[in-house]
Image (cartoon, coloured by chain):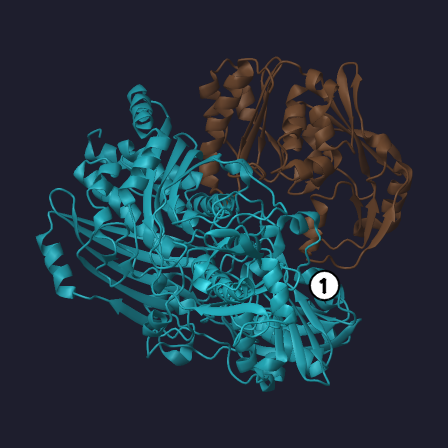
Amino acid sequence: MSTTVTGTDQPRAPGTVMGTRLRRKEDPALLSGEALFVHDLVVPGALHLSFVRSPSAHARVTALDLSAAQAMPGVVAVFGGADLMSEWAAPMPCAWPVTSDMKNPPHYPLATDEVRYVGDAVAVVVAETEAQAQDAASAVAVGYDALPAVVDLEDAASDRVLVHSALGTNRSYIWELAPDAEAVERAFAEAAHVVSERYVQQRLIPAAIEPRGVCVVPQPFGGEYTVYSATQIPHILRTMLGISLGIPEARLRVVAPAVGGGFGSKLNVYAEELICVALARRLRRPVRWSEGRSENSQATIHGRGQIQHIELAADAAGRLKAVRVRLLADMGAYLQLVTPGIPLLGAFLYHGVYDVPAYSFSCVSVFTNKTPTDAYRGAGRPEATYAIERAMDALARKLGLDPAEVRRRNFIPADKFPYPSAPGLVFDSGNYAAGLEKALGLADYEGLRGEQARRRGAGSTRHLGIGLSSYVEMCGLAPSRVLASLNYSAGGWEAATVRVLPTAKVQVVTGTSPHGQGHVTSWSMIVADKLGISPDDVEVLHSDTAVSPFGLDTYGSRSLSVGGTAVYLAAERVLEKARLIAAHQLEAAPEDLEYEGGAFKVRGSPHKSVPLGVIAFEAFTAHDLPEGVEPTLEASVSWDPPNFTFPFGTHVAVVDVDGETGRVELVRYVAVDDCGNQVNPLIVEGQVHGGIAQGVAQALWEEAAYDPEGNLLTTTLADYLVPAATELPSFVLGRTVTPSPTNPMGVKGVGEAGTIAATPAVVNAVVDALSHLGVRGIEMPVTPERVWRALSDATQETQEKGEPR
Amino acid sequence: MIPAMFDYQRASSVEEAVGLLSEHGDGAKLLAGGHSLLPIMKLRLAVPSLLVDVGRLTELSYVRDAGDHVAIGALTRHHDLETSAVARAEVPVLAHVAGQVGDPQVRHRGTIGGSIAHGDPASDLPAAVLALGGTLVVQGPGGRREIPATEFFRSFLETALAPDEMLTEIRVPKSPGGWSFQKFNRRAQDWAIVGVVAVADGSPRVALISMGSTPLRATAVEEAMAGGATPAEAAARAAEGLDPPSDLNASAEFRRHLVTVLVRRALEEAAAGHEGQ
């Protein structure tokens, strides 16, 4: 690999910046503590909020006595749900009514007569300091009359206990996708082999390093509000705040300052955001709130939460003929911004990287007395990948085939792209076999299988397991027309402006909203590459609706392929305008000019040239512009992608399982990812590293655990096991490059790939390690106790059958 | 995540600290490294009215060779114990265990005295001192007294320390021979799900972590070993009479199983003459 370089002030030739390992421009401010997060903002006179939250998963609120809290030192006001009802112009927004008959019970920022999950807010204290607000919150007296709670998904589906009694059911929607149901039935009837598996996707807590925070500064006389929020979506938030609060959108400015990660959890419109704006309006003073870590575990959305049934129909050679999937998806107590749509982001991908002619999918979603679910890194695609990749290993075992071989037999061939999939997508480009073979080579797959056989032969209790995961995902949310067909309430385009200032420095305005991804560096590189200048001469403005009025923000690995493309096209358009001015100055025809090294040159007369800086100054003074050319050198583009992009790859996990204690150690991890052309491989690798860690975490450590009464048990980071570097090996990364034909840079997206691929790779490895002992499956997270029990159960089964395997 | 209101006083001597404890009674708590106390205060599970900060009593930070035993000041940070030449030579197991507590931040702030006085059955150092047959020196308004480690841990987070007493020194007999520390957890930074400290100077002594409401000596195992059992035979008795907790990481049943595996490994490793790490 090439070496890492820092920025230099030297102009670069066009086309030489892309693909280099430039260090992130964002990092000095972040690493030095200079970057300001919401909690760091100094706002004189701001009042602090603290929320009173339900300790009960389901209860009728019988009494609310605010008087003791109101009398506490520093308390300015205390409100219950009923006190604030007049503030809301609309209920909390859900932007994705996936079916016309979807049940979406009204949901307001504070509960009034009933609480439906532990953490549901019933009152808010406003005080002069944060400590005073928290002290007073514990003095609010709430009377609860306990109601039965429903926690388990299958129990919820039975409607034995109702979360929202007025609905008469816990089912929010049933969504089906069966382009040719008959073909599916036929394939299963004719199949030589059928695999039928049930998997549980446990709930996860996104656990961004910065919990949420909101600060609202009103201008009471002007009627304007500046909203600082630790959000991924300042633009969407502004629109939704306007709708929910009845404030003209133009009077709302939303700023996402430095944001410490989101993983989808900050892709939402939260009660606390609405309440902060409402109280700033009501009290005519700045209002702020910083979420605590334990509060975050209950009041910020969770991810995953599904029971998956997947069936594969295969012929005698193990070639897939159909995939049939039934999901039961946990919505939690209410529908948040895109809660209902999350399972459906995977609905088209349960056949994975395999050429499958017949496909059906259905999803039943249910309410439970738990924190609402919503987007979490991968959102739907990790779940789909997990199911198909676990099931492919089950198929391999059934056929006595190597897991790599069963994959090879089923990959969509490289010459079939663009590939129209049975569920109805068109995969843009791919070469799945190449990724698999490269990953197997890097992992020394044959050597590992040899070592595994040696250990088994020697009767070792240290079991070696090798797990594969070949994945494809869907990035670049999204073609607006496709979103329309899925009933999504917004489009999927992205906006960008590129302007060359009089001093030849460049400003880029983007509608994406980075919170750790490195957009400032990557967008600088795109523009520098195009304009032949140094990335250091490019500034990127973002995450402030006053600076960047249009955008659809950052999630779903959309930013580069949609937002980056808009930046690329805007830079191209700037060059087109610059060419007209240059042609005028050089007294040449525009088409006779070539752009090289930051200057236009007359083809064949290299001494006749004019640098971009001179053109920019000319555009600024406007002293001598060609006829019909407006002053300033600036272009804005809104880009609506024609299709999704489909990154892919193969990951290999190697685990060492202690058969006596059940401890699983991840000893080696190889990832070969193909995200198309790479702008900055260093950033790609960082995304892959973090993604793998998060995917491994679902496999081995993390679970939002509830007791049967609906109490969340994992409310601190001592109980919710986010892994550290000590738990993970150094990753071995490789890549293949298959450009996407859907955008001019040929990029795809890589923000979620690691998370999508890693979980099934690790669980497949654990099952592989123990398969010779009769273990066929194990639930996540794979705890030592679960391994121990799986081994005990398998041993017992073997003994009952009276035959060693 | 803000603690309830409390008063704060920094003590400039052990006498002053003990005086403040006597004066304020149950509501006063000693603050040393703060790694046990502050988190539970932030969760408002502990609401002391007064914190007596003893963190700057540097005269209580030492590891000394005291002839037949090693004397460790109560305010010795885990990192200092881990890297102490005296500890590494004379009680290598204790130096090693100190290096396995929490993460580097915890080890640079947390103190051995704080860890032992907190009396958490999931903590590493109390079990190590118990296995070594250590003695705890405490000071109260009436003067000093010495409490054997075997009598110190009374019940969950409860020790023989009176509310107006302060732990000042930990004494452990020199034990340069075989030893083992088996810490079983899911993440390196976590408390042990089950932990075993074995010391094999003479007949093995074994202490258990997270197997009951206090750090425990595995008496059935020690008796079996004294009676000539093999490590495997002795380890099979490791859970005898114990009532381990069930939590998110492990059921009581799994802990009973784990402890037999870990005790066997510990006895084997200690017998083999652990060379340290």
In this view, the residue in front, B242 or A121, is A121
In this view, the residue in front, A728 or B85, is A728
Quarter of the C terminus of chain A within the rendering: top left
From this viewpoint, is residue A662 visible?
Answer: no
Per the image, the residue denoted by label 1 is A41
Q: Which chain is brown?
A: B
- Amino acid carrying mark 1 in the image: Leu
Q: Is residue A90 left or right of residue B140?
A: left
Q: Position of residue A528 (x, y in %)?
A: 54, 53
**From what the image shows, is residue A95 above or below residue A308?**
below
Identify the residue shown where x is 90% and y is 40%: B12
Q: Position of residue A475 (x, y in %)?
A: 39, 58
Q: Position of residue A382 (x, y in %)?
A: 38, 53
| Extreme-left residue of the structure | A190
Q: Position of residue A554 (x, y in %)?
A: 50, 62
In this view, the residue in front, B81 or A800, is B81
